[in-house]
Image (cartoon, rainbow, N blue to C red):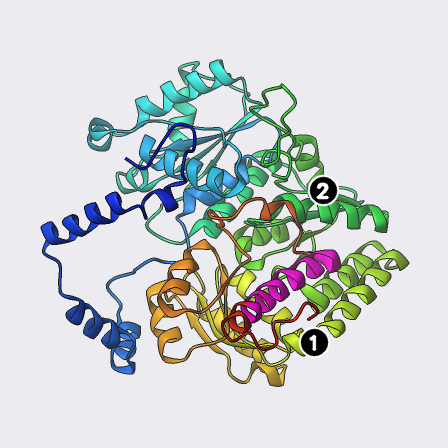
């Protein structure tokens, strides 16, 4: 065998050795697959306009959606609060999926427990599982709060979370006054952004219960929304608040939980928004959501308490950051610091320096509704032209907002908005109307492989690259980071092309 102890080969090289290639050929013969001619013919057909029309008309089947299910969002939001244990009322398999999804993106463990529902609980109900689970979680892990969310199985059989948690208190599985946040998050409707919304609203409901808004304090609540770049972005927000001199509380701050240091200490819980901050948040001057579609129900609840609210669409780039800073200035009465104005100027300068490489490039973008909006806005600021804009969890309101955004710039003329479509639909769109670059998550790499359109990884999840989440994408500094990411891919592709011909393979670009 080609693998030897003194020189271990990576699997990619190992499987290219003759022994493995021969093995693969035998496997193909054993499987009796279609001939190369048949495969080529079918490949041509699925790249055709005829197939595109049939694919886009598809309604009863979703293939590779650009979204995850609700409990994932609830778990993400849960771990952003101090000493809070995410508790999933459902099967172990579901919980393992949510944990691994977050761990593979952030390269950090995600503490969460499950009621381990199996066939008997599905038939007779999950009451006993939830009571035992709460008792074990409270006793073993000693959290400050337990945040319960549900999965398909608990929702389908109609488990009543409110009654079940009260039963657990009655049976002394947990103390009467121990706070348990609850959120109904059925996996078969909505997406992770709805689960995030439900859990944040659940936290406010739990800690604001029976309270009315009192004397207004000069503090601003910031809800980041479901964000794969939360480590870098939340820290960038804190830096901006410090520059401003603003007292602000980030509601669900996961930046420490998903970036724990290696210093010899084990931290099951790290950082997070304190519950004192949550309780005081009712009297804040205003609540700002960084992602409108992640916080619709939460903002409605906050408004009912009489607090002003503002919502943004993932503020990347110049206008997105301008709008955020001007809103902060308006709410607090503080002027925008000169230091941030200088950062704005530097970002504009960087955009101008590279405009010859950016101008006229075409991009397709997929991801959550707010991300696609913010990214498309920044692309047009860079002189790029959005082509296909797809959000599986986007609806008619998002579609209307996207079309209004595209209409604000001549660079938006080619833009087509695709709410509710999946990545298999995106494949047909790119095969028939290709663009220069694709922006999205790691799942876009299969489209890159199939169609040869380079992928720029800029949203959640990013499994096949490391540490992107540590760097911000929000604010002017974040905009600079996004600009460099896009530029690097453009210039890498140019080098790749010119390497083939030897013409214009230059050191200075």
Question: Could you classify mark 2 by the number of other residues whose Cα lies within 10 Å: few (under 14), some (14-19), or many (20 or more)?
Answer: many
Residue 248 seen in the figure: yes
Dot 2: what SS?
Answer: strand
Residue 250 pos. (x, y %): 68, 43
Indicate left or right for 480 with 180 as reference: right
Name the disc covering residue 355, or none: 1
Q: For the C terminus, which image quadrant?
A: bottom right
For disc 2, the marked residue is 249
Residue 477 pos. (x, y %): 74, 56
Nearer the observer, 6 or 34: 6
When the figure is inspected, residue 501 is found, relative to residue 475, above or below; the finding is below
Indicate left or right for 378 with 286 as reference: left
Indicate left or right for 240 with 424 as reference: right
Measuring 48% from the left and 37% from the top, which residue is drawn there?
103
Nearer the observer, 354 or 91: 354
Measuring 44% from the left and 43% from the top, which residue is drawn there?
72
Dot 1: what SS?
Answer: helix
Q: Which residues are magenta?
A: 475-495
Indicate left or right for 454 with 163 as reference: right
Residue 213 seen in the figure: no
User: Label 1 near label 2: C-beta < 8 Å?
Assistant: no
- Residue 476 among those drawn in magenta: yes
Nearer the observer, 280 or 397: 397
Label located before the other in sequence (2 or 1): 2
Residue 305 pos. (x, y %): 64, 48
Measuring 68% from the left and 56% from the top, which residue is drawn there?
474
Name the disc covering residue 136, or none: none
Does the magenta stretch mainly form a helix, a strand or a loop?
A: helix
Q: For the N terminus, which image quadrant?
A: top left
When the figure is inspected, residue 337 is found, relative to residue 418, above or below; the finding is above
Measuring 42% from the left and 37% from the top, which residue is drawn there?
100
């Amino acid at each position: 065998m080609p693998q030897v102890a003194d020189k271990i080969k990576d699997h990619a090289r190992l499987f290219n050795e003759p022994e493995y290639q021969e093995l693969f050929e035998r496997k193909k013969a054993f499987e009796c697959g279609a001939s190369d001619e048949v495969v080529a013919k079918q490949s041509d057909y699925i790249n055709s306009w005829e197939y595109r029309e049939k694919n886009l008309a598809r309604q009863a089947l979703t293939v590779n959606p650009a979204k995850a299910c609700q409990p994932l969002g609830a778990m993400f939001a849960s771990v952003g609060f101090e000493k809070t244990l995410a508790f999933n009322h459902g099967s172990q398999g579901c919980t393992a999926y949510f944990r691994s999804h977050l761990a593979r993106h952030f390269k950090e463990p995600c503490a969460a427990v499950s009621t381990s529902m199996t066939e008997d609980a599905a038939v007779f109900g999950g009451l006993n599982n939830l009571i035992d689970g709460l008792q074990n979680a409270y006793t073993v892990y000693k959290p400050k709060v337990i945040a319960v969310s549900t999965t398909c199985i608990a929702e389908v059989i109609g488990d009543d979370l409110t009654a079940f948690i009260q039963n657990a208190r009655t049976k002394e599985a947990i103390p009467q006054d121990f706070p348990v946040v609850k959120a109904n998050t059925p996996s078969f409707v909505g997406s992770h952004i709805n689960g995030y919304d439900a859990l944040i609203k659940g936290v406010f409901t739990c800690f604001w219960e029976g309270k009315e808004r009192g004397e207004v304090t000069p503090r601003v609540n910031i809800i980041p929304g479901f964000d794969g770049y939360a480590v870098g972005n939340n820290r960038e927000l804190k830096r901006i608040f410090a520059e401003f001199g603003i007292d602000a509380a980030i509601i669900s701050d996961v930046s420490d939980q998903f970036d724990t240091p290696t210093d010899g200490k084990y931290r099951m819980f790290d950082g997070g928004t304190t519950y004192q901050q949550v309780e005081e948040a009712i009297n804040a001057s205003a609540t700002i959501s960084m992602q409108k579609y992640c916080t619709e129900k939460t903002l409605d609840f906050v408004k009912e308490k009489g607090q002003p609210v503002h919502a943004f669409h993932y503020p990347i780039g110049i206008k997105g950051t301008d709008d955020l800073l001007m809103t902060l200035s308006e709410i607090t009465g503080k002027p925008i610091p000169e230091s941030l104005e200088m950062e704005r100027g530097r970002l504009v300068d960087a955009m101008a320096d590279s405009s010859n490489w950016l101008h006229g490039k075409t991009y397709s973008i997929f991801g959550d509704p707010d991300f696609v909006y913010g990214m498309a806005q920044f692309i047009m600021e860079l002189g790029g032209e959005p082509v296909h804009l797809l959000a599986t969890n986007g609806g008619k309101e998002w579609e209307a907002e996207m079309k209004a955004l595209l209409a604000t710039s001549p660079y938006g003329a080619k833009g087509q908005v695709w709410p509710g479509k999946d990545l298999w639909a995106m494949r047909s769109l790119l095969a028939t109307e290709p663009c220069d670059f694709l922006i999205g998550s790691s799942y876009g790499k299969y489209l890159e492989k199939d169609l040869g359109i380079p992928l720029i990884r800029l949203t959640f999840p990013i499994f096949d690259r490391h540490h992107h989440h540590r760097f911000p994408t929000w604010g002017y500094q974040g905009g600079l980071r996004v600009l460099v990411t896009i530029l690097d891919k453009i210039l890498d592709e140019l080098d790749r092309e010119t390497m083939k011909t030897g013409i214009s393979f230059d050191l200075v670009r």
